[in-house]
Amino acid sequence: MKKQIFSSILLSTVVLTQSLWADNAEDLAKAAQNPIANLISLPFQNNTNTGIGSDDATQNILNVQPVWPVTLNDEWNLITRTIVPIVSQPDILTGEERVNGIGDTSFTAFFSPSNSTDITWGIGPVFLLPTASDDTLGSEKWGAGISAVALAMPGKWVIGSLVSNVWSTGGSGEQDINLFTWQYFVNYNLDNGWYLTTAPIMTANWEADSDHRWTVPIGGGVGKLFKIGKQPINAQISAYNNIVTPDDYGADWQIRVMVQLLFPK
């Protein structure tokens, strides 16, 4: 009799825990999909760019991009995002041989109101730091600019857009930087932590001529929120076809795989 009672209590506890996780999974998934959520996270985003040049070379970039929010007061948060790229660059982009190492680091600080209603937004400076371990992996330039993001989360959707522009401010590199980046993102959250996503990253190098200026991808993928032990994890895989890409050295496709460790308060 005691064993039956214990088994019933244990089963009820498991069912309740699973139910609470299911109830919180969608909220946590939405926070993970929000670039300015008040949520500490550590994403590892791997981008494999294929079909570069006549030899169909492959470039790989693993972005380690910790997100750390700071509560300034009752009305404002400061959300910091650092991106450190670990790059494997093919011969066609180095002019010599394949090079592996660290690329230039970017740091963004978004000021965002803590009590947003229908629209969540943030704006702040972005800085480029010449941390490349090889001159073929970076610009050898310091840079600064501005970035802004806005999003809405109606129902099961997370829809938004992030834009930035960075200009070089100094350094020993020969080529000036004037780089525009636009990422729109659309996520639809399904049951049990699953979601559909599209988040292409469009860029324009204003210093390049028209044939080498734009990269415009289209595509999408799927993701899931789950736990390993007590650790919430957001994982996704997606593919993007570059319908516009720089002549001679632009990639045809990008395969993106991301694993994001989440640390909810």
Image: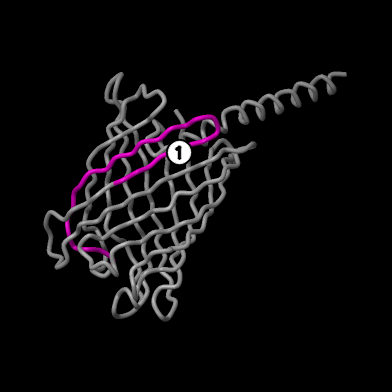
**In this picture, which residue range is highlighted in magenta?**
137-163
* Quadrant of res 117: top left
Residue 152 sits above or below residue 6 on the image:
below
**Front residue of this view, candidates 5 and 183:** 183
Q: Is residue 76 above or below residue 172?
A: above
Residue for point 27% across, 50% down: 106
Residue indicated by mark 1: 159
- Using residue 73 as the reference point, say whether residue 17 is left or right of it: right
Q: Position of residue 87 (x, y in %)?
A: 36, 64
Q: Using the image, determine if residue 177 lies above or below residue 78.
A: below
Q: Is residue 162 magenta?
A: yes
Q: Secondary structure at mark 1?
A: strand
Q: Quadrant of the N terminus?
A: top right
Badge count = 1
Q: What's the magenta bit mostly, secondary-structure-wise? A: strand
Asked which quadrant contains residue 213, the reply is bottom left
Left or right, residue 85 beside residue 179: right
Residue at figure coordinates x 47%, y 32% from the top left = 153
Q: Quadrant of the C terminus?
A: top left
